[in-house]
Amino acid sequence: MPDAMETGSAPAQLSLTRDDPAVMRAVRAQPQIGKPRPGMSGGASRRDEPFYTVAQLASRLSLSERTVRDMLNRGEIPCYRIGPQRRIDPDDLRQWLEQRRERR
């Protein structure tokens, strides 16, 4: 049987999406890291919400980017380091803010 190169047609693209059953089986088979977050069981999931950049977080908290970077460097705000950049999970941010809520 001739391959795609011999026939002149382009090879089929591999699609890795959540619609692919093989991808979902692999995702479900991975061990869960950490403990479940409060408020995330049942109901609508916020997993599709994109991570914040330093600039977006600074804008959302009405702080300067320098202040946010300093807080990230001190480990006050949980974040992920992706190369030289940092990303903040919205769920981690919600939990962090809830811990700092002033109650009277």
Image (tube, rainbow, N blue to C red):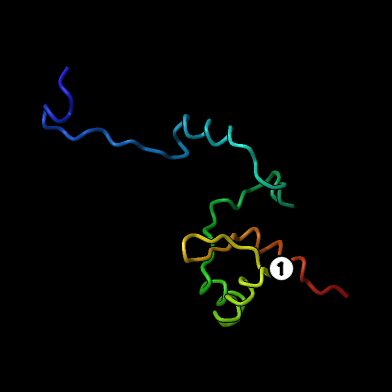
Indicate whether 37 appears above or below 2. below
At a point 59% along the width and 36% down the height, the residue shown is 30
Q: On the rendered structure, is 63 left or right of 15?
A: right
List the single residue furthest toward the right.
104
Residue 18 position, x and y percent, is 47, 39
List the single residue furthest toward the top.
1
User: Element type at marker 1?
Assistant: helix
Report the amino acid beneath label 1: Leu
Q: Quadrant of the C terminus?
A: bottom right
Residue 75 position, x and y percent, is 66, 68
Which residue is identified by label 1? Answer: 97
How many numbered circles are shown? 1
Residue 34 position, x and y percent, is 69, 47
Residue 83 position, x and y percent, is 46, 61
Indicate whether 7 appears above or below 100. above
Q: For this rendering, which residue is in front, 33 or 41?
A: 33
What is the quadrant of residue 62 in the picture?
Answer: bottom right
Q: How crowded is mark 1: few (under 14 residues within 10 Å), some or many (20 or more)?
A: few
At a point 71% along the width and 45% down the height, the residue shown is 41
At a point 64% along the width and 58% down the height, the residue shown is 91
What is the quadrant of residue 94 in the picture?
Answer: bottom right
Q: On the rendered structure, is 50 left or right of 73?
A: left
At a point 61% along the width and 71% down the height, the residue shown is 72
